[in-house]
Amino acid sequence: MFNSKFGSIPKFYVRAPGRVNIIGEHIDYCGYSVLPMAVEQDMLIAVEPVKTHTLQLANMNSLYPDFNTSTKNIQIDKTKPLWHNYFLCGFKGIQEHFGLSDLTGMNCLVDGTIPPSSGLSSSSALVCCAGLVTLTALGMNLSKVELAEICAKSERYIGTEGGGMDQSISFLAEEGTAKLIEFSPLRATDVKLPSGAVFVIANSCVEMNKAATSHFNIRVMECRLAAKLLAKYKSLQWDKVLRLEEVQAHLGVSLEEMLLITEDALHPEPYSPEEVCRCLGISLQELRTQILSPNTQDVLIFKLYQRAKHVYSEAARVLQFKKVCEEAPDNMVQLLGELMNQSHVSCRDMYECSCPELDQLVDICRSFGAQGSRLTGAGWGGCTVSLVPADKLPSFLANVHEAYYQSSDRSRAPEQQSLFATKPGGGALVFLEA
C-alpha cells in the first residue's frame, strides 16, 4: 500500500496505543491523578522522510481522505476535527518545542485498530504517534515524559481542553501493569491489577467526538469556575486559581474536607453567568474574555456544585482503588468493582457525561457477572469498562453480546471492536526498517 501510494518504501514505523481509563474520569484536567492502562489496539504510522518540504498523509481507512501540506506553514482548523489535524497537532508540537521553522517533509501512511470516537483515545494516540514520528524523522531525542507533555499541550490546537492522561499513558505504559498517572510534575507508578479478574471493554456504538461538540469544554470551564468560587469563599487568590486541585493544595486539607467545603460554598441550583460574575465581583465581559474558552462563552448555565462534588469524590476513588490493589485483600475484586460502580453513578448523575445506551450497557454488564462496570473516556457515548471474574468471562461475553449487540442497529459494528477482554499493553515505540 505504501509503495502504491508514494512509489517508495518506508524507512521506519511508529506505534502508539489507545487506553482504557479504569477509574478517574474527567479529573486529569482538574489536576488529579488517574488510573489508566494501555490497550493492545493502537495507531501505526509508516514513514519515509523526504527532501522536499511537503507533508503527505494517507490513511489505510478509505473514510479518511489523503492530505498534504507544506511543513513551513502548518494550519490546524479548530472548527473541523478532521483526522489529519490530529497528526498536525503532534507534528507542530515537536516543531515548536525545538523552535524549528524549516522541517523536512515526510510521506506517512496511517493505520489504526482503535475504534474512533469510542472513548479509547484514538485521537490522542494519533497525536502521540505523529509527535514520535516527527521526533524520529528529525533524529532528535526526548524523554517519554517530555514527549507526553508536549503532545498533551499540542492536542489543544484542535480546541479540546484536555488534561494529559491520554498522552501520558500512551508513552509511559508498560505491559502487564496499569499506571497511576500524577501531574505537576508528570510521573507514573505501577498499579498491579487483580490476577483473578479481567477488564472487558464494551462499545456502546454511540460515537462521541470531543472536539466536535462543546460538552467536554463546558465541563472543563465549570470545573474552572467552581475552583474560583471555592477559592474566593476561602479568601484565596481566586484569580490565580484554574484547577480544583489547586484549591485543595492551597488549603492543605483532605479530599473529604473539600467535599464538605463544596457543600458549604456552592449551591446545587445551576449558576447563571450573571451570578458567577456577582460572586467573583467581575463583569460579564471579563468572565467571557478572561476565564471562559472561546467555545464556551455563550453557555447560559453552569452546574458548579455537581461538577466539584464529582471531581473531589472521583479523585478519592482513584486513591482508594490504588490502595486496594496494593493491599490485595481477599475481597479485592468486589471492592474494586464497588469503586467502579460508584464512579459510574457520579459520572451519570453529578457530571452528566453518560447517555442512555451507556447506562443500559453498564446494567447489562453488571447483570451478567461484572463486579463493577462504568463508562470510560469522555462519555456521552463510547465504551464501558467492566471488571469480570476470570471464570465468568466466556459466559459474560456471550450474554452481553446477545443482550446488547444482537439488536439490529448495533450488530453492524465489527464484533472484535465492540466487546473484548483486554490486558495492560506497552507504550509507544519506533521500529526501524531492517
Image (cartoon, rainbow, N blue to C red):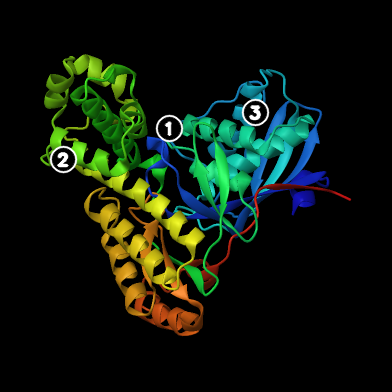
Q: Is residue 294 left or right of residue 377?
A: left
The mark total stands at 3
> Mark 3 sits on what residue?
94
Of labels 3 and 1, the one closer to you: 3
Instruction: Point out the tag, 3 or 1, that comes first from the N-terminus.
Output: 3
Q: Amino acid at mark 2?
A: Glu
Badge 3 amino acid: Ile
Q: Nearer the viewer, residue 78 or 286?
A: 286
Q: Is residue 180 above or below residue 369?
A: above
Q: Label 3: how many residues lie within 10 Å, few (<14), some (14-19) or many (20+)? A: many
**Residue bearing the label numbered 2:** 263
Asked whether, in this view, residue 330 is left or right of residue 50, the answer is left
Name the residue rendered at 28%, 58% in the picture.
355
Say which residue label 1 marks: 159
Measure the alpha-carbon separation of dots 2 and 1: 32 Å
Q: In the image, residue 1 lies at what x, y percent? A: 74, 54
